[in-house]
Image: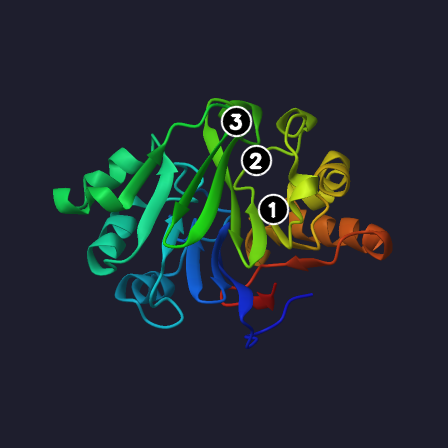
Amino acid sequence: MGKDKVECANEVTYIANAGVLLKLHDKKILIDAFSKKVGPLFMCTSTAIREDMIQGVPPFDGIDLLLITHEHEDHFDEESVGRFIQRNHQTVVISNSMVIPRIKNYVQNDMYSRLIELNTKLHHSESICVNGIAIEAISLIHDGKEYEDIRNLAYLIRHGKTILHLGDAAPVKENYISLKFKQQGIDLLIANFPYINRYWGRKIIMDKIKPKKLAIVHLPEQEKDIYGWINATKKSYERIAMEFIPTELLQDAGMTTPI
């Protein structure tokens, strides 16, 4: 399903867990790129890739935006983000009120202007344009009953192409009743794996979002997949592939696919 490096003006490169690098023409955007190890199942950002991002080694040079969906450590490592901000002076960070204050503990006061804190109400959105990129942040219920108090921010990104990254948004109809994603002409949806291996997840993608392409993230590491989620996800997609959205399973760091 996946491809190695592809030379393309618009592409997504997998980093780890839900972390990706988006290249949209002349812009570069990191989403949930700095993650820590949480539990035995999911991949965290490797030391090598973490340091390449911090040092601005290509393809991680000239990052315009760093978007963080929420504060869970498999999506956010404040110490690494702080180091990144100190070295990458052009990057602006956008996230919620639980993330931004924690980053401030690792940077100097004169860097605060590049940290944008959003307090988006559940099932509402906020729009902002930063470094020439249009961003809409949408607060959606986090997957899992025990995390319903977490304000997960999905990001709708427009710069030539239209990308939607859901973070850990639950694949439940309550998240999509009032949203008009289907009318947005989404070129790529980046979603956690329950959106492909659960009936309601697939129905939401087809009925509420209808992207041109789907990239699945947040899969467990292959050798640690004790619940068989990878196999179940692949089988779910194979059963419906002919009538479903073209889909990539992003599992290996560095995997790149065109948008």
- Residue identifier under label 3: 124
Which mark, by number, is residue 169? 2
Tell me which numbered mark, 2 or 1, is placed earlier along the sequence: 2
Quadrant of residue 195 within the rendered picture: top right
Front-most of residues 153 and 182: 182
Instruction: Residue at 64%, 67% (x, y): give it.
Output: 2
Q: Amino acid at mark 3?
A: His
Which mark, by number, is residue 89? none
The quarter in which the N terminus is drawn is: bottom right
The x, y position of residue 91, in whole percent, is: 30, 55
Tell me which numbered mark, 3 or 1, is placed earlier along the sequence: 3
Instruction: Residue at 14%, 46% (x, y): give it.
Output: 110
Q: Amino acid at mark 1?
A: Ala
Which numbered mark, 3 or 1, is in the foreground of this view? 3
* Contact flag, marks 2 and 1 (Cβ < 8 Å): yes
Which numbered mark, 3 or 2, is in the foreground of this view? 3
Query: What kind of element bears circle 1?
Result: strand
Query: What kind of element bears circle 2?
Result: loop
- How many residues crowd mark 2 within 10 Å: few (<14), some (14–19), many (20+)? many
Give the vertical position of 234 relative to 61 (above or below). Answer: above
* Contact flag, marks 3 and 1 (Cβ < 8 Å): no
The x, y position of residue 239, in whole percent, is: 84, 52
Give the left or right position of residue 188, taking residue 125 as reference.
Answer: right
Q: Amino acid at mark 2?
A: Ala
- How many residues crowd mark 1 within 10 Å: few (<14), some (14–19), many (20+)? many
Give the vertical position of 1 relative to 123 (above or below). Answer: below
Front-most of residues 149 and 94: 94
Give the vertical position of 217 relative to 103 (above or below). Answer: below
The x, y position of residue 95, in whole percent, is: 38, 39
Instruction: Residue at 72%, 37% (x, y): give it.
Output: 208
* Contact flag, marks 3 and 2 (Cβ < 8 Å): no
- Residue identifier under label 1: 191
